[in-house]
Amino acid sequence: MHLHSAAAAAGYRLLNYATVASTNAEALGLARRGERGPLWITAQQQTAGRGRRGNAWSSPSGNLYATLLLHDPAPAEHAPELSFVTALALHDAVGECAPALRHALTLKWPNDLLLGGAKVAGILIESERVDEKLTVAIGIGVNCEHHPADTPYPATNLALADANISAETLFAALSGTMVERLTQWHRGSGFAAVRADWVARAAGFGVDMRVRLPDRELLGRGEMLDDQGRLLLRLADGSVQAIAAGEVFPLAAAVSREPPTGRHT
């Protein structure tokens, strides 16, 4: 693994492991011991990778597993916006490495990258208070060569779309696009521009969906994001509910499991 020149010039550093339990857990453990970043942690394989809500994240060798550790990246109320920043950086990086796939890449609220309507990458953001400041671990998993089967939402990988992008190549691009998108965001002051760019690449607006919350499920039509990045869901009674976090599944069985092919040259 190596950093993009823009990331190195901006003071980012890199720790690469052959195997680690979880890149997020490793990042937060380092933060507790005094690391302040900005620091990328990557691994060829994870033995205890995890996704949102504590779900296990399959971590075979060949995919990208990376975490960016940031200390005091923004006031705490802006920290959730980092999922949109990161999703855009992922979209940028995959599009840069495989231009033929740009038309098939979309973003799914709140933190997934889709390829041909199937999940190809996910983001897990975790935070802790360290020295009275917020420390954030931005975990990123990209299915470069493998993807799990029988998932609640269809999954795919880049190789299936003839995009033979190594984890190393994709990480180098991502470390550069993250610098650009974090600069655009500017500790939250630029979120309006981030939100607009995210919406322009989004899937799922204007369709009926099921939103899974910790204590219940809601059915409605996804209408838009509000200015805080919350999903605006119009319910059957006509009311609109703003949802800060949840898992989204389209009701229409229109999600393709096979991405379009388009070999990257």
Image: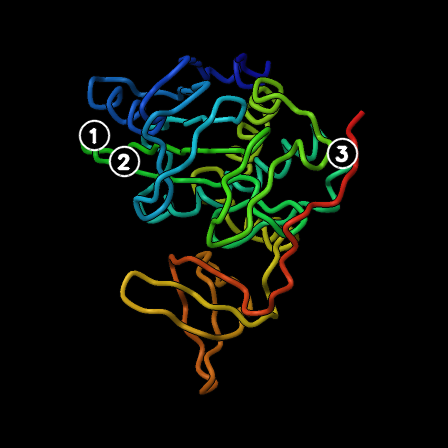
Q: Amino acid at mark 1?
A: Val
**Pointer 2 or 3: first along the chain:** 3
Residue 27, horizontal then vertical, whole percent: 32, 24
15 relative to 198, above or below: above
Q: Which residue is mark 3?
A: 99
Splitting the image into 4 quarters, where does residue 211 fall?
bottom left
Closer to the camera in the image, 181 or 243: 243
Closer to the camera in the image, 12 or 100: 100
Q: Which residue is mark 1?
A: 130
Residue at x 57%, y 27% (from the top left corner): 174
Q: Measure how far apart labels 2 and 3 are at the Cα level.
A: 36 Å
Residue at x 39%, y 58% (from the top left corner): 246
Q: Measure how far apart labels 1 and 2 are at the Cα level.
A: 6 Å
Residue at x 44%, y 14% (from the top left corner): 14
Q: Measure how far apart labels 3 and 1 are at the Cα level.
A: 40 Å
- Pointer 1 with pointer 2, Cβ within 8 A: yes
